[in-house]
Image: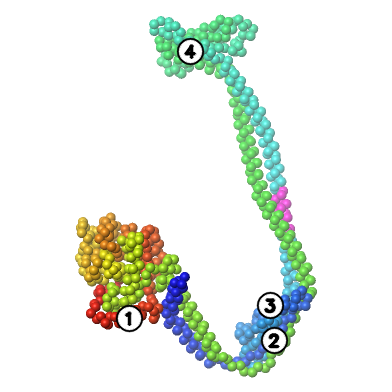
Amino acid sequence: MEQNNQLDIIWILNVLWRRKWLIVGLVFLALATSIIMVRQLPPEYQASTTIMIEQSKSSNLNEYSMLMAGERLALTYSQIITSRPILEQAIADLNLSLTVEELEEKITVQNISNTQLIKITVTNASPHQVYMIANAIAETFIDYIETLTADNYARTLSDIQLSIDEKQSEITRIIPQIDSQNQEKADLEAEVARLESLLTDNRTNYQTLQSDAQNLELTITQLNNKIRVVEPAHIDVPLGYQTYTASLMMFFDQDIIVGSSNNSGRISDLILQVYGPMLERDYLLDEVIDRLGLRTTSATLGAQISYAAIPNTQFLQLFASDTDSSQAILIVDTVADVFIDQNLSSLSEPYTVRLTNLEADMSEITTQMNQIQAEINRNNSLIIPIDLYLERLLSELNTKYSDLRELQARHDQYILEAKQSTNSILITEPASLPTAQSKNNLLYVGMAIVVAGILGVGAAFLLEQIGDKVRSQHDINALLDQKPISLIGHIEKGKDKLTLGINSSPHVAEDFRKLGALLRPAMEDVPLRKLLVTSPSPGEGKSTVAANLAISLAKTGSTVILVDADLHRPQLEYLFNIQSDKGLSEFLSTKRKIVPLVETEHQNLRLLTSGELPDDATALLSSPKLGNVLDDLASKARILIIDCPPILTLADTSFLTPLVDGVLLVIEAGKTKRKSVVEAMALLKMAHIPFTGVVLNNATTQPGGYYHYYEKEYRKVNKSHPGETPIGSSPQKE
């Protein structure tokens, strides 16, 4: 918490220091303007009138409450004194050559604390005019309040009566609506009752038809048993060596045998007379041929079939002969089936027709019942919103009645209060002829300076907030909810961009040492073996940060390989003053197996330059060979640092982020846009990189702070060691 407060104070001081000329300019402008205006102002005179507000005696309040109520009333009246009607009347009475606005500027109204007194002060260049204006405003105000009070009571009563009339009108409007909805609901309920009665009648008719249909189905089922096979087909003794005879037994019910009831002894003869010829008919034999798919004629098949009645019984024995025993059984079974189907069809046909008609009637009744039920459901669905609407109307009606009773009570109460409540206003101290009043010029000037200073500070912070540039670690914390892992100071003109040299910036060198020290735990824990250095946009110092970070880590004894993967705008060759005709582009575009690393003048630090700029850098960086070469380089060093193009400008960085263990996002204070920081960090979060840090480059520090002290001490040391040479060459612009 203490650290956060310290950072906020530093940020505030930095903002004030950067905007100091704005603040100073506004203060000097206010000072000059106030001095000029004060000298040009003419002398002024003041006159005051005091009035007292007396609370009504009829008020049911104690002495203290009456005093407080009087103070509040006086506060209200003080606002009315400078209103347009009062000022217009005073101008007319005194025949003043002033507008309402001009007169209002000359009047000051003051409520005297803990009293019911109001003091009216008028300021003007004319001593005779000020006391006349003060007294005229007080008298005009008293007349205005008396008239206003009387009009207010009448207007209030009129307003209350108008509200009562409106409520009664609203009640009159709601009642017919309720009646209409009740009638509509009653009509729907009557229709539902009628439909439900009709539905009940249809259900009764349906049950009757259903019972008749069931009886018919039972009758048809019974008819199906009038003729039936009682002994399944089997092979009798063969007629010859190549002929088989199959037989079965059929039973005939007495109900279908003509005359059997009169002469039971002739049952077998009647069966032969009536049903025997049916077995020989061509339409029966043709049906058997069709069912079995036989290639024969009805005459041939008829020759294979014979029958005999068992005397004095209701049984008929049917025979069929064939050279194939299975075919003989199949023929006799089929003949029996066709015979039974044809005879029973004629018996059950009247019943079947009636059953079909009954089923049609039942279907029609079912359709009618479904329609009636749908109409009932529709009417019930219409009743539901009517009930809801009625409930809302009744609730609204009750509310209107309640409001009406309240308004009537207010009307009666207000009439009573109007008869008893009257406030009196008295002039306790009229204005007199004033003496000349001198103005406090120093006070005016001082107030102008203070106001200008406050406005200057406010403008400084306002410009800081509405600006679209990142300027401090406070801005980064607000945008990303995280602090930058390191701040890199400003490299002054004439200083080398590569640090740790005599002609370099000593405080910036210390910044890079701190950055290297902060990354070393991540190199052990993550582990951080491949580090990508990028920025949202070009020119934000990413190459400078990458180069100096590599030097800082190399000086701690770690082996470092620095790769220039910016194939559009490489900078590392210029920073290290190295000329190499082979680099990353040549390795990726050819079948070379040896990476062309270049030794630098810094121990433990080697460099892979960008090489010749390719026509299609994106195609090279999207090559699968890139991942292999980065893994190979990482195995040869403690850490691999990759300088890549800006993440928002080119798509190249998207091919590199999946191949690394961490990313450093370089942001330049005063240059990088806030929107760019947010967009860049969003892209990095989408890549799911284990380690991501933000470095604020070109960060400002408070004048007279640590860095300034450090730089002075560093210069003293350099004077005692003149033999040291700077590291790095003259800087190139990124």
Q: Which element type, helix, strand or loop, lies under badge 1?
A: helix
- Mark 2–mark 1 distance (CA, rounded to whole Å): 71 Å
- Give yes or no for contact between labels 1 and 3 (Cβ–Cβ under 8 Å): no
Residue in the image at 61% along x and 20% along y: 219
Point out the stretch of residues depicted in magenta: 171-183
Q: Which mark is residue 630?
A: none
- Find disc 2 in the rendering and name its residue: 50
Q: Which mark is residue 713?
A: 1
Local packing at callout 2 (Cα closer than 10 Å; few below 14, some 14-19, many 20+) is many
Residue 730: % across, % down:
26, 75
- Nearer to us of marks 1 and 3 is 1
374 or 616: nearer the viewer: 616
- Nearer to us of marks 3 and 2 is 3
Residue 223: % across, % down:
59, 18
Q: Is residue 36 visible?
A: yes
- Give yes or no for contact between labels 2 and 4 (Cβ–Cβ under 8 Å): no
- Find disc 4 in the rendering and name its residue: 233
Q: Which element type, helix, strand or loop, lies under badge 2?
A: strand
Ranked by sequence position, the earlier of labels 2 and 4 is 2
Local packing at callout 1 (Cα closer than 10 Å; few below 14, some 14-19, many 20+) is few
Q: Is residue 299 visible?
A: no
Residue 44 position by quadrant? bottom right
